[in-house]
Image (cartoon, rainbow, N blue to C red):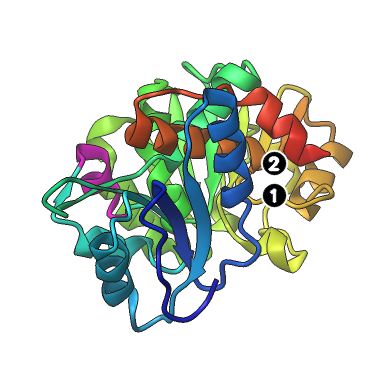
């Protein structure tokens, strides 16, 4: 949906805001959750002009909208907009979930990191305690997963980025939570890792981060935060090098949506059947 919008006040309204947003799977995911849990709601995607985020949020809330998911490029705008923030949203500097209370106050949260960990640990049984982790990229997606990743107590997290200063900023910001080191792609130590997370958007362009093949061995799990209908170039690269497990970001997408659904409705939906439906 684009342009100004009018909500049907006879139903509970939720939406995802983004630009562009027509590709979003969120309406389908939340419709499946609603059907599964017996909750009646209407969830739609709304394309927001890049200079009208605050105006659209106010319009949505004033018409009785109860909750929003926020996708690119508005997660930092949402962080600035919200009346109050959860601790994890405050720390990572972005918001992907907004809940409106009866006074139309906006409470901002981020569920991306918890969605990532739930997919990694519960759906794929990956345990990284005392293991070496390599994260590629230093953008908003990486910022959102760092705190819950540190909670899993890996031995070390290396953040590698083309612009080293951005990786250093993240390493410094989250330094109290774990052993985090920043470096360039070319400076990654000649070691292999138990978990490699591609937090760049290069997969969407069919490109790979410029890293050495030696980072992967037969015990490495490779996780691409991006997803597509076929294996991403990062996933194909990891498989060719013999990684033990190769995962895309679809499970994270569904799991973060389930966390948002719980924030709004107090009910945690089952996710595996939804992931399988989307795969088909």
Q: Secondary structure at mark 1?
A: loop
Instruction: Please say if the residues under marks 2 and 1 sit with CB atoms less than 8 Å apart.
Output: yes
Q: Nearer the viewer, residue 207 or 38?
A: 38
User: In which quadrant will I find the N terminus?
Assistant: bottom right
Q: Which residues are magenta?
A: 86-94
Q: Nearer the viewer, residue 107 or 189?
A: 107
**Residue 91 as seen in the image, left or right of residue 146:** left
**Residue 186 as seen in the image, left or right of residue 258:** right
Residue 18 drawn above or below residue 268: below
How packed mark 2 is, by other alpha carbons closer than 10 Å (few <14, some 14-19, many 20 or more), is: many
x, y (%) of residue 5?
43, 73
Q: Is residue 255 magenta?
A: no
Residue at which label 1 appears: 227
Q: Nearer the viewer, residue 48 or 164?
A: 48
Q: Residue at x 33, y 47 (%)?
A: 171
Cα separation between marks 2 and 1: 5 Å
Residue at which label 2 appears: 248
User: Is residue 253 visible to us here?
Assistant: no
How packed mark 1 is, by other alpha carbons closer than 10 Å (few <14, some 14-19, many 20 or more), is: some
User: In which quadrant will I find the C terminus?
Assistant: top right
Q: Earlier in the sequence, mark 2 or mark 1?
A: 1
Res 75 → quadrant: bottom left
x, y (%) of residue 173?
25, 48
């Amino acid at each position: 949906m684009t342009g100004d919008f009018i909500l049907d006040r006879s139903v509970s309204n939720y939406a995802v805001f983004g630009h562009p947003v027509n590709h979003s799977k969120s309406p389908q995911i939340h419709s499946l959750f609603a059907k599964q849990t017996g909750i009646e709601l209407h969830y739609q995607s709304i394309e927001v002009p890049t200079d009208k985020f605050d105006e659209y949020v106010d319009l949505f809330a004033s018409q009785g909208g109860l909750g929003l998911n926020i996708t690119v490029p508005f997660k930092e705008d949402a962080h600035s907009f919200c009346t109050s923030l959860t601790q994890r949203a405050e720390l990572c500097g972005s918001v992907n979930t907004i809940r409106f209370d009866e006074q139309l106050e906006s409470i901002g949260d981020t569920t991306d990191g918890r969605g990532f960990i739930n997919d990694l640990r519960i759906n794929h049984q990956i345990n990284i305690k005392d293991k070496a982790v390599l994260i590629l990229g230093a953008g908003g997606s990486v910022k959102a997963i760092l705190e819950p990743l540190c909670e899993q107590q890996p031995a070390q997290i290396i953040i590698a980025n083309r612009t080293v200063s951005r990786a250093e900023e993240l390493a410094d910001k989250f330094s109290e939570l774990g052993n985090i080191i920043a470096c360039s792609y070319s400076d990654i130590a000649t070691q292999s890792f138990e978990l490699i997370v591609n937090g760049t958007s290069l997969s969407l362009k069919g490109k790979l981060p410029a890293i050495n093949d030696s980072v992967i061995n037969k015990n490495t799990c490779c996780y691409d935060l991006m997803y597509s209908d076929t294996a991403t170039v990062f996933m194909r690269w990891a498989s060719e090098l013999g990684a033990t497990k190769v995962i895309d970001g679809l499970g994270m997408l569904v799991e973060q949506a389930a966390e948002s659904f719980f924030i709004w409705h107090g009910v945690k939906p089952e996710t595996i059947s939804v992931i399988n439906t989307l795969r088909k």
